[in-house]
Image (cartoon, rainbow, N blue to C red):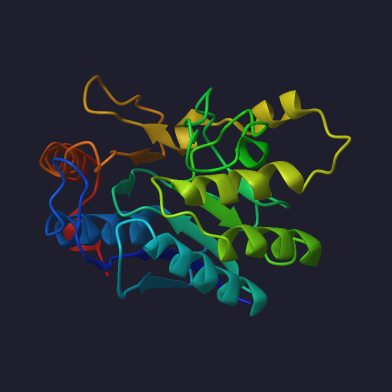
Amino acid sequence: MSNILVSANYVVKGFRFGATQQSDYDIMLEMWKCSFQKNLQHLDDIIIFTGEGGTYNIYRDIYWKIRDLYIQGHNVLWADLDMLCLGPTEIFGQYGNFMMFFNNDTHLDYSGTVPQRIWGSLLPWFMANLRYYPSGSIEDWLWKECDSLVKNWVDTWAYECIVHNYMFHSQFGSGFQKENLLRYHNPSMNFQWEGEGSIPEDSKIVHFHCTRSSARSVGKMQQMFNRYIMKGECL
């Protein structure tokens, strides 16, 4: 069993993310990798998924690749490329269930694209940019239900977030009080910088929301990288 950090850097056909440039992901990847190598404790390996796909359906491919690693018995941590790990961070071995770390108060509105019976009850809604799959924590029945959601993929913005929130909610069973999910909300572990404002000093991992504007996100990432990460220490 290994502790594996994963992310993805795909060539996206018909790339469309507003003010985001696909070439900026290569710049982010180097900073992302260096920051996690330095600060993520007990890390054994890093895997970057690559390939080609459409703007949205690349996440379907990513789901299956993460599932394969999990089935092999590994602890798997997913982190989007537009993130930095700014200080010593313990995730591997610290949690006994599938984890997401930041409650976003409300979910996206998928009306007209995805039946509301699938996503309407998934509150509190957690950000899917950082997810931890501890080995042995997700039961087979839950994988099968999530597999079904993925096999019936809807090619729309953030459909994968429905899948991940479904897994996060459903793992606790029907009698679980959803309000108790809020105890997993940990902004210091997954702070959301959305283009303005300061970043709290106690932030361990920060998400820079590249899909809002990659140039702005890369600029802020470089600023924080230069402040917290010494490039000479990267492996």
Q: Residue furthest bottom?
A: 72
* Percent coordinates x, y for residue 24 in the rendering: 14, 54
Residue visible at 52% across and 24% down in the picture? 106
**Residue 118 or residue 227, whichever sits in front:** 118
* Percent coordinates x, y for residue 207 in the rendering: 34, 40
Q: Residue furthest front?
A: 112
* Percent coordinates x, y for residue 14 in the rendering: 19, 60
**Residue 20 or residue 111, whichever sits in front:** 111
**Residue 23 or residue 159, whichever sits in front:** 159
The reply to whether residue 41 is in sight is no
* Percent coordinates x, y for residue 227 in the rendering: 19, 39
- Report the side of 148 relative to 81 (left or right): right
- Report the side of 200 relative to 75 (left or right): left
Q: Quadrant of residue 93?
A: bottom right
Q: Quadrant of residue 231?
A: bottom left
**Residue 212 or residue 150, whichever sits in front:** 150
Residue visible at 30% across and 26% down in the picture? 199
Q: Is residue 176 above or below residue 53?
A: above
Residue visible at 49% across and 52% down in the picture? 160
Number of marks: 0
The reply to whether residue 191 is in sight is yes
